[in-house]
Image (spheres, rainbow, N blue to C red):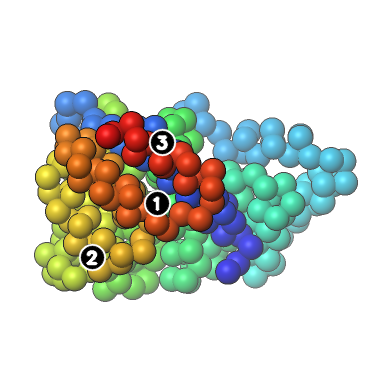
Amino acid sequence: MKKQQFLVVGGGVLLLLVVFFFGKTTPPVKAKAGATVSAPSETFDIQSVIKGATAKLSESQQTYVNGLSEAVVRGDVKEQKIKNYQQLARFWSDSARAFVPFAYYTSEAAKLENSEKSLTFAARILLDNLRAVEDPGLKSWLAGESKELFEKAIALNPSNDSLQVGLGSTYIFGASAENPQAVMQGIQKILEVSRKDSTNMYAQKMLGIGGIVSGQYDKAVERLEKVALSEPHNLEVLLMLAEGYERKGDKAKAIEWYEHAAEHIENPVLKAELDKRIKQLK
C-alpha cells in the first residue's frame, strides 16, 4: 500500500462510523431545475489553504516546502514538475499529515502525468474523502477536482466502467442541498453502467448509496443487499445497508445488518460505539 493512502484508509472504520451514524446521508430538499455538480466556491481558495497550512510548519519544513514550490514555478520540464508535485504530496501526507495540500499536489501531478493510472488514483482519493466533508467550499473543490480527473481518465479509456461510476459518484457526493438534482444526474450516469452490466458491484454499491442520499430507501437497500451477498466482508456496504433500513423504519433489519457489521470490527472502541447504536434501536 502506498503511504499516500493513509488519509483514505487510515482509520477508515472511524470515518464510516462518523459518516453513517451522524447523518451524512440526509435526504436533500426539493430539487431545483438545471442543477449540476457544484462549481468551486468563490470563498474557497486552495492556495490560501496551502499557505495557511505552510505557516504552521516548522522553519525547516517551510524552507523545504517553499523550495519545492518555487522549483515548480520556475521549472519548464514536465517530468521535473511532476517529480516536485509528487515530493510535495509525499511531504504533506507523511510529514505534515494534512489532507488538502496532499490532495492538491497529488491531483496536479496526475494532471501533468496524464496516465489513466495516476488520474484514477488521484480521483479516487478525492472522491473517497469527499463523503465526510461538510464545509461547502472544500466539498465543492473536492467534487470539481475529482470530476475533472475522472473525465481526463475517461478520455484515455472510455470503455472503463469503473471510471464512469466514479464520475457519477462525484455528482452524488458533490451535490449541495440547494442543488439536489445533481444527485439524480449522478445516479443516471451510474445507471448506464448498471444497465449494461448488472453484475458490476461497484455500480450497485454507488447506486445504493445514492439511493439513500436521495431518500429512495427501498431501491437502495435492494441494491446494497445484492452487494452484501457478493461481498459479505465489505464493512462499508454492511454499515450503509443497516443505515438504509434504519432510515426506512425497519429497525429489525437495521439491527441485523449492524450486527453483521460488528462481526468485522476488531477495534474495541469502535465496536462499543456500534453496540451502543444497536442497543438504541432495540
Label 1, secondary structure: give it. Answer: helix
- Give coordinates of residue 198: x percent, y percent: 15, 68
Type of amino acid at the residue the image marks with label 2: Leu
Q: Residues within 10 Å of mark 2 (few under 14, many from 20)?
A: few
Q: Which of the 4 image quadrants contains residue 46? A: top right
The answer to whether residue 78 of the structure is visible from this angle is no
Label 3, secondary structure: give it. Answer: helix
- CA gap, disc 3 to disc 1? 11 Å
- Is 207 on the left-hand or right-hand side of 148? left
Residue at 26% of width from left, 57% of height from top?
Answer: 205
Tell me the quarter of the image containing the N terminus: bottom right
- CA gap, disc 3 to disc 2? 25 Å
Residue at 27% of width from left, 34% of height from top?
Answer: 282
Does label 3 or label 1 sit earlier along the sequence? Answer: 1
Q: Which residue is mark 3?
A: 276
Does label 3 or label 2 sit earlier along the sequence? Answer: 2
Q: Which residue is mark 2?
A: 229
Q: Which residue is mark 1?
A: 262
**Of residues 182 and 85, the one drawn nearer to the viewer in this rendering:** 182
Check contact, mark 3 vs mark 2: CB within 8 A.
Answer: no
Residue at 68% of width from left, 58% of height from top?
Answer: 90
- Give coordinates of residue 50: x percent, y percent: 65, 39
